[in-house]
Image: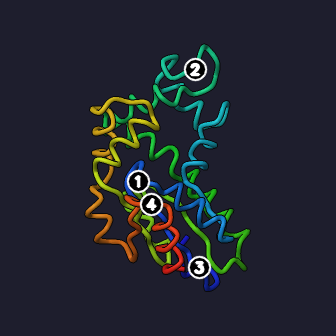
Amino acid sequence: MTFGDWPPQRRIGLTGGIASGKSSVAALLEKRGCPVLDADVYAREALATDTSASKAVVARYGKRVQKDGTSDIDRAELAAIVFNDPNERSWLEQLVHPIVQRRFDDALRSLPDAPIVILMIPLLFEAGLEKWCSEIWVVRCTALQQRERLMARNNCTEAEATQRIAAQWPIDIKVQRADSVINNSGRIDDLHDQLDALL
């Protein structure tokens, strides 16, 4: 799938560092009437109970990734595995990313007349999906804000937060590749103003 395969449409790739505020920006865009396609939602659905991907995860890691003796995936335990081992993270990405890509493909086919579609993809650059987008917006905040937000959101230690941030591309590299940069280190009114200017 490439951007050229589709009718003229603003396909905005929304990305940025972990816990930088992508979801907050996406929510504001959705309120403005822009459909938001969320890679994280598709990834969670891919690992839902008894899917082929979740069965593959259990086959690889066993009971340690099963929640309370059920067939549900313990996402916290799975995250601990893959963020501690780049090889395991690569294996999981190779399992889940094709499923997520098919979901994007189906969703985009259902929105041919939407003038703007938001593709929220945290690992957009890492996965080489720039070709899906007509433009790319990167959300950023300060390094301290990012770390503190991640610790609060995931109830993790500073060391764990630092490790997860380091697992992604440095934000400065993403900023260099962006068409537009959204600064999410200030007030909500500032976000509104930036989005008004970009849309």
Q: Earlier in the sequence, mark 2 or mark 3?
A: 3
Scheme by which the image is coloured: rainbow
Quarter of the figure with the N terminus: bottom right
Q: Earlier in the sequence, mark 1 or mark 4?
A: 1
Label 3 crowd bin: few (<14), some (14–19), many (20+), radius 10 Å:
few
The kind of residue on which mark 2 rests is: Lys
Q: Are marks 1 and 4 in contact (CB under 8 Å)?
A: no
Q: Earlier in the sequence, mark 4 or mark 3?
A: 3
Mark 1 residue element: loop
User: In this orientation, which residue lies closer to the viewer: 124 or 26?
Assistant: 26
Gap between marks 2 and 4 measured at Cα: 38 Å
Mark 4 residue element: loop
The kind of residue on which mark 3 rests is: Asp
User: In this orientation, which residue lies closer to the viewer: 31 or 136?
Assistant: 31
Residue identified by numbered label 2: 67
Residue identified by numbered label 1: 20
**x then y, percent, for residue 139:** 41, 62
Looking at the image, which residue is at 27% across and 56% down?
170
The kind of residue on which mark 4 rests is: Arg
* Disc marking residue 5: 3
Query: Where is residue 160, by image quadrant?
Result: top left
Mark 3 residue element: helix
Query: Where is residue 148, by image quadrant?
Result: top left
Q: Earlier in the sequence, mark 2 or mark 4?
A: 2
Q: Is residue 19 left or right of residue 132?
A: left
Residue identified by numbered label 4: 187
Most extreme residue toward the top is 69
Label 2 crowd bin: few (<14), some (14–19), many (20+), radius 10 Å:
some
Gap between marks 1 and 4 measured at Cα: 14 Å
**x then y, percent, for residue 134:** 50, 79
* Disc marking residue 91: none
Label 1 crowd bin: few (<14), some (14–19), many (20+), radius 10 Å:
many
